Image (cartoon, rainbow, N blue to C red):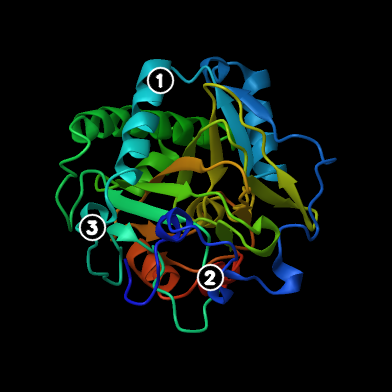
Amino acid sequence: MDSGVPAVQSLVENGTAHVPQRFVRPIHDRPSKFSSPDLDDIPVINASQLSDKIELQKLDNACREWGFFQLTDHGIPRALMQSARGVIREFFRLPQEEKESYTASSTKLRREGYGRYFLPSKDTVLDWGDVFFHALPPVALPWPVHPAEYKETIQAYGAQVRSLALKLLAALSRALGQPPELFGDAFGPDAHSSLRMNYYPPCPEPDLVLGLSPHSDGVGITILLQDEVEGLQIRKNGEWKPVKSMPDAFVVNIGDILEVMSNGIYKSVEHRATVSSGNARMSAAFFFSPGFEAVLKPLVPDEKPLFRELTFREFITAYMGNALNGKQHLEYAKL
């Protein structure tokens, strides 16, 4: 854990009755502001029917209008999803000292390990959550020793979700009227996967904090595994919409890279995480991204490209160099 920045789980276990000032959001940025449960639910897409034109059109509409969708009938076994949730929960239950042994130093491209994904400055308002992040397989740190099933389970889970991500890229290419290999080829042979595991402990004053700051994902596509505790919200028409937890479904969202490659047709969307006073929440975000030397540019024919040509290395270096702040970092790629 970063020096001087406490693990939220430790704060809760030590019986804190009030939120430390470093976690308190400005009034305009608190979770009660501009939250609207009355908006329509995000679309639900049946992965087993994406060869059907009607379901493919639903996918296209979801990515144009929402940037998010629930994915059902995806073919990943329920038992494997439950096992992944289980080993992640067990990791966060480890003694604090053992978790902190997996803290790794940061680079311009990634920060693997336990702690905070974005290194905070002294003025940064902190998120009410702890994170364990690593590439698949890990690059800058070893596989966790405990729980004993962690490596085997996450390897199996990661391989199946990566295959699902490639299938979704092919479907998205087809939905845009392009060859199915368009996005997959653009990601390149070195396309990489990573997993960000989030643990949001109960909070004594949940209306003052956020579990995760508003942001869009600086990746190609994100496939999120949730538990039954809700907390994810997406920004729609200036309001925050809670995303329901659906048993056995993934929440999928378009990342900044696909917004660039689709020339803005598909949108990456701001999202955030809220917390509750009574329940801890766990989620695991699988990120699928191009290789670092892959060239990012609009791939869909259009008279007016909205984004310039750059490598994923350039983009992610700029992304990692700033705190989470809505979609501000996407300006770096715009013409």
The nearer-to-camera label among 1 and 2 is 1
Q: CA distance from mark 3 to mark 2?
A: 34 Å
Tell me residue 276's x, y (percent). 63, 48
Residue at image coords 63%, 31%: 59
- Dot 1 or dot 2, earlier in sequence: 1
Residue at image coords 80%, 36%: 40
**Three-letter code for the amino acid on which mark 1 is drawn:** Ile
Residue at image coords 55%, 46%: 254
Front residue (pair 146, 214): 146
- Residue 103 is tagged as none
Quarter of image, res 140: bottom left
Tell me residue 88's x, y (percent). 35, 38
Label 2, residues with CA under 10 Å away: few <14, some 14-19, many ≥20: many
Front residue (pair 284, 210): 210
**Three-letter code for the amino acid on which mark 3 is drawn:** Glu
Disc 2, SS: helix
